[in-house]
Image (cartoon, coloured by chain):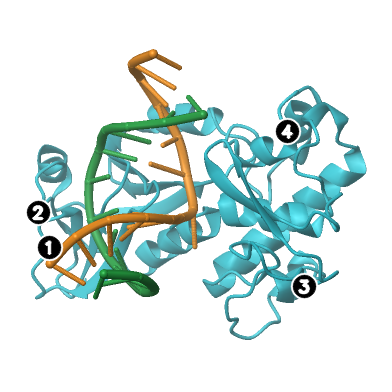
Chain colours: A cyan, B orange, C green
DNA sequence: TTGGGATGTCGAT
DNA sequence: TCGACCTCCCAAT
């Protein structure tokens, strides 16, 4: 269930709860058993992210996690027995973090991490991200903008929800080819990505409607948010803006929700 | 109790 | 373009 904002929150959560003390590291499910044994008893020194990739940093090693479609971490009291599906448990004696269902859970080194990041596009959650790199890839592509926004080598961290919401906010027709996108349109979409992801990371919930007209700085002034989106998941309802019936299409096997009038 | 679907990605056709 | 991966949740039965 994770797009880039959720991964950022999980990194922050692990820094807050699990750094600074030796951890008991196990793999109740067994599929990470040898790796867990290799780092058992070490301290976590930090956690970083790029797009949907999470890196848990230990002395001398990094645990690379990609949650895929249904992976997740859940926090428990240390005394709670882990479910048999738990790939990785980090336990500081007080709390345990249980990872289940990841696509990737692997022990890597810093060179591996650099390679992984080099394959990814700029991450809108990073203040140092360079949108020009994404723009250059989009400008020379014949793929549709709907495909390109989901391509992690173009922009890292956007998933199916944010794709729909970014396209809607930018009033962008989803099937326009990358090479036909204007720089202004790209800038609108990039800024929306920055604002939406940053708000999602801050509040832990997706409310694109509340934050769409805000600057990144203004996001930090909001109180708690409830989930609210322009078009995602809303096929067959009336567009929030123009009241036209919204549509759902399939793009590269994923459902794309959009308004045929606002996004024409 | 069952089964369909999900905020993802890869590899085989 | 489709199925596999692998787990959880919730609506329908």
Question: Seen in the image, is A183 located left or right of residue A233?
Answer: right
Residue A75, image x and y in percent? Answer: 27, 71
Query: Measuring 76% from the left and 49% from the top, which residue is drawn there?
Result: A190
Q: Which badge, 3 or 4, comes first in the chain's sequence?
A: 4
Query: Measuring 89% from the left and 39% from the top, which residue is drawn there?
Result: A183
- Asked if marks 3 and 2 touch (Cβ < 8 Å), the reply is no
Query: Measuring 73% from the left and 37% from the top, which residue is drawn there?
Result: A145
Can residue A248 be seen here? Answer: yes
Q: Which residue is mark 2?
A: A28
Find residue A240 and name its label: 3
SS of the residue at dot 4?
loop
SS of the residue at dot 2?
loop
Name the residue nearer the viewer: A171 or A126.
A171
Quarter of the rendering containing residue A149: top right
Residue A184, image x and y in percent? Answer: 91, 44
Which of label 3 and label 2 is nearer to you? 3
Q: Residue furthest bottom?
A: A223
Q: Which badge, 4 or 1, comes first in the chain's sequence?
A: 1
Q: Which badge, 3 or 2, comes first in the chain's sequence?
A: 2
- Asked if marks 3 and 4 touch (Cβ < 8 Å), the reply is no
Question: Seen in the image, is A107 located left or right of residue A153?
Answer: left
Name the residue nearer the viewer: A200 or A246.
A246
CA distance separating discs 3 and 2:
47 Å
Find residue A144 and name its label: 4
CA distance separating discs 3 and 1:
42 Å
């Amino acid at each position: 269930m994770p797009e880039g904002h959720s991964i950022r929150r999980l990194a922050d959560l692990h820094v807050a709860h699990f750094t600074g003390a030796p951890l008991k590291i196990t793999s109740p499910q067994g599929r990470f058993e040898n790796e867990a044994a290799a780092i058992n008893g070490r301290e976590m020194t930090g956690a970083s992210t790029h797009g949907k990739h999470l890196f848990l940093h230990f002395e001398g090693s990094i645990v690379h996690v990609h949650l895929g479609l249904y992976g997740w971490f859940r926090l428990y009291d240390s005394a709670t027995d882990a479910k048999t599906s738990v790939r990785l448990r980090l336990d500081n004696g007080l709390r345990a973090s249980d990872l289940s269902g990841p696509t990737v859970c692997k022990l890597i080194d810093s060179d591996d991490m650099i390679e992984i990041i080099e394959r990814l596009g700029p991450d809108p959650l990073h203040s140092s991200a360079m949108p020009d790199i994404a723009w250059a890839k989009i400008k020379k592509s014949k793929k549709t903008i709907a495909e390109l926004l989901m391509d992690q080598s173009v922009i890292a961290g956007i998933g199916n929800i944010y794709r729909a919401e970014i396209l809607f906010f930018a009033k962008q027709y989803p099937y326009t080819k990358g090479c036909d996108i204007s720089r202004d349109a790209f800038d609108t979409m990039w800024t929306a990505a920055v604002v939406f992801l940053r708000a999602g990371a801050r509040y832990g919930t997706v409310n694109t409607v509340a934050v769409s007209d805000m600057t990144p700085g203004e996001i930090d002034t909001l109180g708690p948010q409830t989930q609210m989106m322009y078009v995602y998941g809303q096929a067959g309802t009336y567009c929030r803006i123009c009241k036209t019936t919204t549509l759902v299409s399939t793009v590269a096997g994923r459902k794309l929700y959009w308004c045929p009038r606002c996004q024409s």
